[in-house]
Image (cartoon, grey):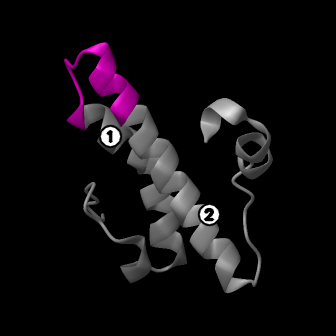
């Protein structure tokens, strides 16, 4: 059985290992932030979301596709965002 950590680089894994790593990643992060306050839990959630987004973006780039970050039109039209 493979042992995955937060430092595991999905690039070095085969397809089956990546799927297993992705399924276990959230638990890895939750275990790393056990007994933390709300601010640290927010960081945990951002870490999980960022890692999923990066992995998805990389997978799509192999197919010549890209994900939309969805915030470009908001920041262009928001005077407070500049």
Write down the residue under mark 1: 29
Q: Which mark is residue 62?
A: none
Q: Give the residue at x 25% y 34%.
A: 31
Q: Earlier in the sequence, mark 2 or mark 1?
A: 1
Q: Quadrant of residue 35?
A: top left
Q: Secondary structure at mark 1?
A: helix
Q: Quadrant of residue 42?
A: top left
Q: Give the residue at x 31% y 43%.
A: 28
- The magenta stretch is 32-43
Q: How far apart are the alpha carbons under marks 2 and 1?
A: 18 Å
Residue 60, percent from left and from top: 69, 73
For this view, does 34 lie left or right of residue 42? left
Q: Residues within 10 Å of mark 1 (few under 14, many from 20)?
A: some
Q: Residues within 10 Å of mark 2 (few under 14, many from 20)?
A: few
Q: Is residue 38 above or below residue 79?
A: above
Label count reads 2
Residue 23, percent from left and from top: 49, 50
Quadrant of the image containing the C terminus? top right
Write down the residue under mark 2: 56
Q: Give the residue at x 37% y 81%.
A: 12
Residue 50, percent from left and from top: 48, 50
Which one is nearer the viewer's eye here, 73 or 23?
A: 73
Q: Are marks 2 and 1 in contact (CB under 8 Å)?
A: no
Q: Secondary structure at mark 2?
A: helix
Q: Give the residue at x 74% y 83%.
A: 63
Let me know if residue 65 is in the magenta part.
Answer: no
Quadrant of the image containing the N terminus? bottom left
């Amino acid at each position: 059985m493979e042992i995955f950590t937060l430092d595991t680089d999905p690039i070095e894994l085969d397809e089956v290992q990546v799927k297993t790593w992705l399924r276990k990643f959230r638990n890895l992060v939750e275990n790393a932030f056990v007994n933390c306050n709300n601010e640290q839990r927010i960081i945990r959630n951002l870490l999980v979301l960022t890692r999923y987004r990066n992995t998805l973006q990389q997978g799509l780039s192999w197919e010549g596709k890209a994900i939309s970050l969805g915030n470009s039109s908001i920041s262009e039209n928001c005077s407070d965002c500049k």
